[in-house]
Image: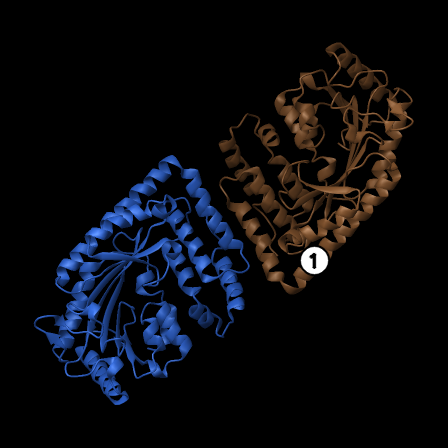
Chain colours: A blue, B brown
């Protein structure tokens, strides 16, 4: 398997299935681990990093838990393919851009990705469509345990797992859930809904992580603390918080359909019309309108289009994906035209409500 | 012939034909005339107004110049039909709303309309698609001469025709041309283009006359002075001014097509997409987007749609027209939904570029 083999799939996190998938796009768990007795990646020498890469690559392979595994030494991967992996949430932007020996182990399903020599020696990540925290936790815990029997993790009895950045010390675990909240946004209820998070261990960010704005009505809920809270508690708590917000979004959707159905239909269909006819569009605007169409599909006013298909359109109109689709480099201006053409073609035979 | 007979036509001024019709929507000449020895309409008694109405109605009929003439006593016309006539530019808003004896003589082609007891005893109006000032002048002059041989007009050798408002004294003539200037608007060249009018006898207003904003990139050029300038001079001058502005618009359109074709196509098609899918839309927004689609049709990027068809959509989505189409009164909210549905249906089988 190589990077191009991933082209035939949409990626686990965009399948549009799973629990609460009308509102929850995807769930993710990430564990930060380091090898005992080695310097953290940013302090290590090139030789140490190379040693670590080999050590961890082999340990991962030896677990035998990753089905149809692909291991990539990122230094040997083309920039466009690294960006492609970033867009699929399989590696981080930082990992793609680093300038030392580093790698990633992937499964064909794209549920698991293990980054070697990212900020920590090892970052184990599991992704799933919908709200599937318990299942993810079971899988990642099994994988982590299997690795722990092969690698001596840096661990302190007092603090827990030791990590390059103090914010990850403890469980080294980050749980996050990506939610689609168009009704809360359109009714300006979103701030109220998110304010309830202040009393919890969780925080909210826009799509594409820290410091980014909420584009496309997408919000990412994740934990702040990694110290002094057990993994299974965190899993239970985030599921509860997410279900509470999802219920809020669902109630608002129902209220809109009852009191202001026309405005909702109008909003969804105008976005459909724009996407189906624009001649140039950037990814952010495309995402914004795909969000409204998705809302229309979820609320039953646009039929004959699936959420999975919309997700596919979204994924394939990201810059690296589009360039792989076209088989050539595209400057941003040309990219916006190709994106618009691709979306038009995809929406050309829609069913009407 | 009655008002409903007009329903089968689009009206002369929206035919989308004639000179410079890629930019000039319509031309209009209006003459203000009063009967000698009678008080102006606003000072006259009800008896005098009734007498005037009969006198002028008969005089108009006797000329025999109005083909298939319809004479309407507006006091007997339903408000919805009066509004319908306003939307067709056949009577003024003030004439529709006045509360005394008044009437209008129309031709089936909608080229001519003669308002009796508007601000003046008689307002003769001729309308045409495109830039057709000379032809209009020949027709209106013939009609005016024929009337003058039957009615003793209030005329002063020193001032010319006497009118209720001093701004019309002299020729009593107002010439106006409605222009569609989307390229000048989109490139912000419009102010510069219109500034050149400052040195002329002409002024510019937004669509729907004095005090209204330029909606849908529509601008109305008309004369200010009626005193001290001969009719044929005015006709020649306005044609010159309009052709100058039309050339400016045309040059900018060509420059856009050369340098920024995609942006132009994008703008036109996005408006098409919005119109083809919106579930609720008010007339102003509809006009705004119809304007962009019209630009796309005129510039050859949207095919299979004629300007005449767009004009028809525009006319039939005005409030009174829509209510006549639906055969019932509609509150504004319902009207916006019916308008959106009508536009969707009209654009449902477009040709793609």
Going 75% across and 47% down the picture, which residue do you hit?
B197
Q: Is residue A313 above or below residue B151?
A: below
Image position of B42 with respect to A157: above or below: above
Q: Place residue A118 in its image quadrant.
A: bottom left
Of B110 and A163, the residue lying toward us: A163
Q: Residue at x 39, y 70 (%)?
A: A7
Please state the horizontal and vertical placement of residue A286, each as a whole percent of the image: 45, 58
Quarter of the image for residue B71 reads top right
Seen at 68% across and 50% down, the residue is: B191
Percent x, y for residue A191?
Answer: 31, 48
Looking at the image, the residue that sits furthest to the front is B158
Q: Which residue is mark 1?
A: B252
Which one is nearer the viewer's eye here, B271 or B100?
Answer: B100
Farthest top residue in view: B47
Residue A148 in the figure: left or right of residue B121? left
Q: Is residue B342 left or right of residue B177?
A: left
Position in image of residue A175 (x %, y %): 22, 62
Can residue A289 be spotted in the picture? yes
| Farthest-out residue, bottom | A47
Judging from the image, mark 1 belongs to the subunit labelled: B
The residue lying at 35 percent from left, 75 percent from top is: A96
For label 1, the SS is helix
């Amino acid at each position: 398997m190589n990077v191009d083999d991933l082209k035939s799939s949409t990626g686990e996190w965009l399948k549009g299935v799973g629990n609460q998938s009308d509102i929850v796009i995807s769930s993710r768990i990430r564990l930060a681990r380091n090898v005992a007795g080695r310097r953290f990646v940013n302090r290590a020498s090139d030789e140490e990093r190379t040693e670590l890469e080999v050590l961890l690559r082999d340990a991962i392979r030896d677990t035998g838990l990753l089905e149809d595994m692909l291991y990539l030494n990122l230094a040997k991967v083309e920039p466009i393919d690294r960006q492609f992996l970033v867009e699929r949430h399989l590696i981080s932007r930082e990992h793609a851009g680093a300038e030392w020996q580093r790698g990633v182990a992937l499964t064909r399903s794209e549920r698991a990705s293990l980054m070697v020599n990212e900020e920590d020696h090892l970052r184990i990540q599991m992704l799933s469509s919908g709200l599937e925290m318990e299942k993810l936790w079971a899988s990642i815990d099994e994988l982590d345990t299997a690795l722990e029997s092969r690698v001596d993790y840096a661990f302190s009895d007092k603090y827990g797992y030791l990590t390059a950045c103090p914010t990850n010390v403890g469980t080294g675990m980050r749980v996050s859930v990506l939610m689609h909240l168009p009704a809360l946004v359109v009714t300006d209820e979103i701030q109220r809904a998110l304010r309830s998070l202040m009393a919890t261990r969780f925080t909210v960010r826009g799509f594409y992580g820290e410091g980014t704005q909420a584009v496309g009505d997408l919000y990412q809920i994740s934990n702040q603390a990694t110290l002094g809270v057990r993994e299974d508690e965190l899993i239970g708590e985030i599921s509860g918080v997410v279900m509470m917000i999802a219920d809020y979004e669902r109630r608002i959707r129902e209220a809109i359909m009852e009191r202001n159905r026309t405005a909702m239909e109008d909003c969804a269909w105008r976005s459909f019309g724009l996407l189906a006819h624009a001649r140039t569009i950037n990814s952010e605007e495309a995402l914004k309108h795909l969000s409204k169409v998705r809302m229309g599909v979820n609320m039953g006013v646009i039929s004959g289009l699936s959420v999975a298909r919309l997700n596919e359109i979204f994924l394939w109109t990201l810059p690296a994906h589009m360039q792989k689709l076209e088989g050539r480099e595209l400057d941003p201006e040309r990219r916006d035209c190709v994106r618009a053409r691709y979306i038009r073609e995809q929406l050309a035979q829609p069913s009407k409500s």
